[in-house]
Image (spheres, grey):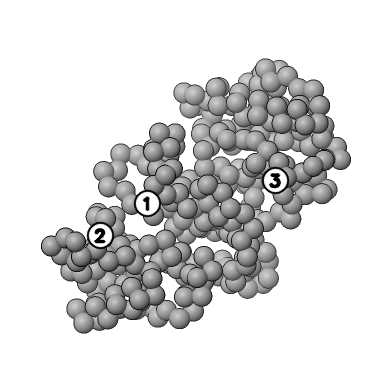
Amino acid sequence: MSQAGNLLRTLEKEDLRILMGIELGMKKSEYVTIRDIRFYSRYPLNETLYRLKKVHKFGLIIRNSAELEVGYQINSIGYDVLALHTLVERNVIGQLGPIIGKGKESDVYSCMDDDENIYALKIYRMGRRSFKHVKKLRNIIGKRSHLSWLYVNRLAAKKEYEALKEIYKLGLKTPKPIGYNRHIIVMEYLRGKELVYYKDIENPVYLFNEIIFQIREIYKKANLIHGDLGEFNIVSDEEGNILIIDWLQSIPNDHPNALKILTRDIQNVCNYFGNKYRVDCDTQEILQSFLDKE
């Protein structure tokens, strides 16, 4: 990501337009021919070839000459460049900071806008290893016959951003969504850490009750179930403020497997607080409080 940020300063608008042309073509094919890149970018052949050579030298695209026609595809750095460019143009961010988190499917960086507000920038990095898992468990792909890995990440970011918007507008404890583009989400940053990294918590019963209250409110008012809730995706600061993060696997509360998945989420929280802090909790009793009509 830092490489993409540095390259963005040196690229010209014509270079970005070539990258966008390849991006458009990748919706239909894995590699995009020069003829199609010309069509999407609206450049003459000489300009197209010059810009292709330039962005290829910068390491933003992959060239395939094994077929009858030479083709190109954007790599992850090129996709980062396009997303960062759009976020900067929209004044969502002005400066990229250091990495603050790394997971199986995404990386998280700090960033600032032009008013020096600090945010978290989440960039999806789902690749071939997790693709079968994504296809099996997550309703983000649909019935598309051709799908690039970059577009899978774009769909993932869109799904999480929309979930954050629905929850945050109710005043509940998820990060405030600031903006998104392609495979990147910019959101509120809480100066804390995931529960799993705390050796001790001053008032675990209070924190447990707050988490249960929040996921109950989200279930009833936003009609959403987290789907992967646990100590790795609940952030808390030293004052006991929390944010529930990572909503990619969320499902609506009328999903056929809603009850099973909701029970698992509650059980995960109970297991963590019960095993580590001896908090007394009854999964079925808590579940019933979710299902009771007010």
For residue 146, above or below residue 289: below
Residue 287 seen from this side: yes
Residue ID at (81%, 31%) = 277
Give the residue type at disc 3: Glu
Distance from the alpha carbon under mark 1 to that under mark 2:
12 Å
Q: Of the numbered discs in the image, which one, if any, rests on residue 149? A: 1
Distance from the alpha carbon under mark 2 to that under mark 3:
40 Å
Give the residue type at disc 2: Tyr
Residue ID at (20%, 65%) = 65
Circle 2 is placed at which residue position? 31
First-in-chain label (3 vs 1): 1
- Number of other residues with Cα within 10 Å of mark 2, as a class: few under 14, some 14 to 19, many 20 or more: many
Say which quarter of the image contains residue 41: bottom left
Say which quarter of the image contains residue 46: bottom left
Residue 197 spot, x, y in % from top left? 73, 45
Residue ID at (47%, 75%) = 8
